[in-house]
Amino acid sequence: RDRRAERLVAGRPPRFFRPVRTHRGSYRRPRMPKVSKKVVAAVASEVGPLGSYVDGLVKQGLTRALGPGDRVPLEIFFNYALFSLCICLGIFTASRIISPRLFKGAMSHLKPFEVKIWHTNMVTFLPTFAVTFFALPAILKYSAERYTFIAPASAETLKATGMSLGYMTWDLMVLIFDAKDQMAAYGGVTPYVLFLFHHSFSIAAWPYAVSAGRCVYFVNYFLVSEVTNFNMSLRWYLMKTNREGGSLYFWNGILWIPLFFCVRVAVIPNLVDRYLNSDWSALGTNETWAARLLLPVPVMLNLYWFGLIITTAVRFLVTGSEGGHVEAAEGARGRAKSRKKAD
């Protein structure tokens, strides 16, 4: 204690305030943790799709969880996430009531677990229209600097994120509580696990990203890629109703390839360029690690899925069947012809 006092009197700082000596004999300042920049929200408060009463509940919940403050971006996000969950429940319920009457003949050939998947898969058409409706204008209106991770999210981005993550929350619950049948529907353990990780990471990271104005450009593109869900969902229904030999199945697959490539693959060089050359110093330490680890995940998944689509398409064009068996293809064509005659 006396030595420390002597140093202060002599003008010498205590040991823990001194620069750190390196192995070469030079001195450097102690490194301080990076502090991220704050972004002022560029959106105004508005009445949500479920009405002012739900808006009040959302605001009250955010205040209890995070303390008092102005959190308009989070309010918009949660309002549309709840709206999306309600739509998912409505589509599922409507399918259980209407589908057995409207598609009685087609559903009569399904296995019991496939009847259940029929209703849950009806919900997968939602992101194609609802998310793209908001995400596409968000991309067109985006005007921040090219090489920056910091930019406020627009109202369209917040709404698209809410609609998307509301659907993913629903789908994640279906995956978890109906694991065995969902695994069979997705084609095995690997696709099932990939969807689990995809949904979980998105739900964990995107709300913070759009409300804090982090990596918004990337989130916009990940959101608009939901438009390709339509072809994937329609393909499942055509397969389960034995229409693989029909023209609708053929054209759905043919159109799916360029759409998937343009929306999910062709944009990858642009996303990688922004990822590598943007100003990482603007992000905090935790934000930097999260962005470095999570931003490449959708890119890698899109490349993996596109490889599967191309492989399946080539096999179908060569053999006439996704399984690669000519006999199965001829059987599918025969069933399609007999169904057409019956119609």
Image (cartoon, rainbow, N blue to C red):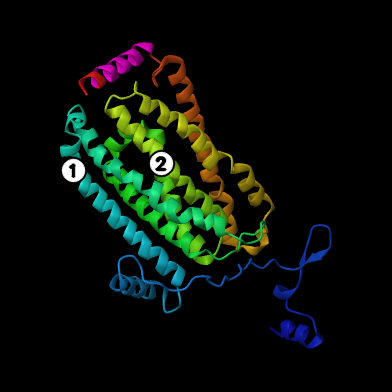
Decide which of 39, 333 is in the foreground and name it: 333
SS under mark 1:
helix
Which residue lies under the disc numbered 1? 98
* Residue 215 versus residue 171 in the image, above or below: below
Q: Position of residue 139 (x, y in %)?
A: 54, 55
The answer to whether any part of residue 301 appears in the image is yes
Residue 215 visible here: no
Q: Quadrant of the C terminus?
A: top left
Front in this rendered view, residue 87 or 34: 87
Is 330 included in the stretch rendered in magenta? yes
Q: Which of pointers 2 and 1 indicates the residue nearer the eye?
A: 1
- Image side of residue 174 versus residue 221, left or right: left
Asked where in the image residue 203 lies, by quadrant, the reply is bottom left
Q: Residues within 10 Å of mark 1 (few under 14, many from 20)?
A: few
Q: Is the residue marked by circle 2 packed among few (<14), some (14-19), or many (20+) residues within 10 Å?
A: some
The residue drawn where x is 22% and y is 44% is 95
Q: Amino acid at mark 1?
A: Ile
Earlier residue among tags 2 and 1:
1
The residue that label 2 is drawn on is 229
Give the residue drawn at x 61%, y 61%. 143
Q: Give residue 289's quadrant in the image.
A: bottom right
Rendered location of residue 80, percent (x, y)? 37, 61
Q: Magenta span covers which residues?
A: 326-339
Say the numbered circle drawn on residue 84: none
- In the picture, which quadrant includes the N terminus? bottom right
Query: What residue is drawn where x is 76% and y is 70%?
Result: 19
Q: Main secondary structure of the magenta part?
A: helix
Q: Residue at x 80, y 84 (%)?
A: 11
* 183 drawn magenta: no
Image height of 130 relative to 75, above or below: above
Report the amino acid beneath label 2.
Asn
**Cα distance between the residues tagged 2 and 1:** 22 Å
